[in-house]
Image (cartoon, rainbow, N blue to C red):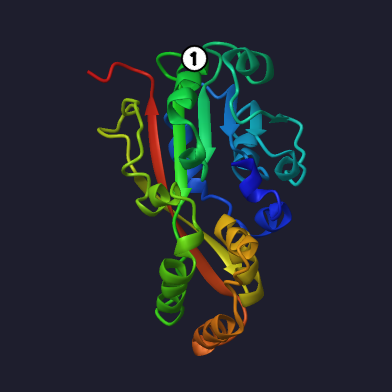
Amino acid sequence: MADLFLKQAKQYSVARPSYPEELFQFIVSKTPNHDLAWDVGTGSGQAATSLAGIYKNVIATDTSQKQLDFAPKLPNVRYQCTPPNMSMTQLEHDVALQSSLDLVTIAQALHWLDLPSFYQQVKWVLKEPHGVIAAWCYTVPEINECFDPVFQRFYTIDSKPYWEPARKLVDDKYRSIDFPFVPVDGADHTGPFEFQTERLMDLDGFFTYIRSWSAYHTAQEKGVELLRDDVIGDFKRAWSEDGNGQKVVKFPVHLRIGKVGDLN
């Protein structure tokens, strides 16, 4: 996973969206204690930054030190570079003790993990019975009826051969991902629950977002330029249909949330 984002770590930190306040308020309403949270696959700290305003302390881990180098430095956030296959001993030493966490979050990264091993770790570190795991992804952005069809063709045709197979779990909004947890209090299922985050972007900023994709760099390594002149021309024409300048880019967010418990 770490290697997929090494080359574009700076672009990732600049272009990727933050997450909506409503998402965090929903999550925090399901965790009665707000002492310690673990943000897994934190990247450049988008989710950890929001968690730091709610939880007393946050442990934010990633397998890429280069990604962590771009994360905001906050007094109650401890960033830790961890190996891709972290042992239980390493988990206890570098992350948290058994039954010590109120919350585990993982934003736009669950699909990259060895899920059986990760879920074993989550169940070990979460407090019972109220510790919560919250995992979410965002799907392709939406702007307007002029631009969206052009972008969808680019995403589904041009970029499709260069995405990792795990990307299908994101496209499916995490509905089909294995998630062996029970619904949190007040919910009758584990999701996905739907939210939306927005970001103002100009067209250059939108191109930076595309260049932060793992698929974009995989294509480059194969000698393929996804943002060809003709593609850029199509984007420019669609973007300018309702005026140039910044536009509101909407990212749909899909949350799975649950807690440790008996599934039977």
Q: Which residue of the protein is positioned furthest toward the front in this rendering?
A: 222
Residue 228 occupies which quadrant of the picture?
Answer: bottom right
Decide: few, some or many residues near mark 1? Use Cα within 10 Å; few <14, some 14-19, many ≥20.
Answer: many
Is residue 246 placed above or below 83 in the rendered structure?
below
| Residue 31 visible in the picture | no
Left or right: 185 in relation to 57? left
**Residue holding disc 1:** 124
The structure residue drawn at horizontal position 32% and vertical position 35%, both measured from the top left corner, is 190
Question: What quarter of the picture does the C terminus occupy?
Answer: top left
Name which residue lies at 70% across and 51% down: 9
Name the quadrant containing residue 29.
Answer: top left
Residue 225, position as x, y percentages in the image: 61, 72
Image quarter hosting the N terminus = top right
Residue at screen point 58% across, 52% down = 18
Q: Where residue 101 sits in the image (x, y, percent)?
A: 54, 19
Q: Quadrant of residue 149?
A: bottom left
Residue 39 locus on image (x, y percent): 58, 33
Per the image, label 1 sits on a secondary structure element best described as helix
Image height of 4 relative to 209, above or below: above
Q: As shown in the figure, which amino acid type bears the numbered disc 1?
A: Trp
Q: Residue 67's spot in the image, x, y percent?
A: 71, 44
Q: Does residue 95 appear in this view? A: yes
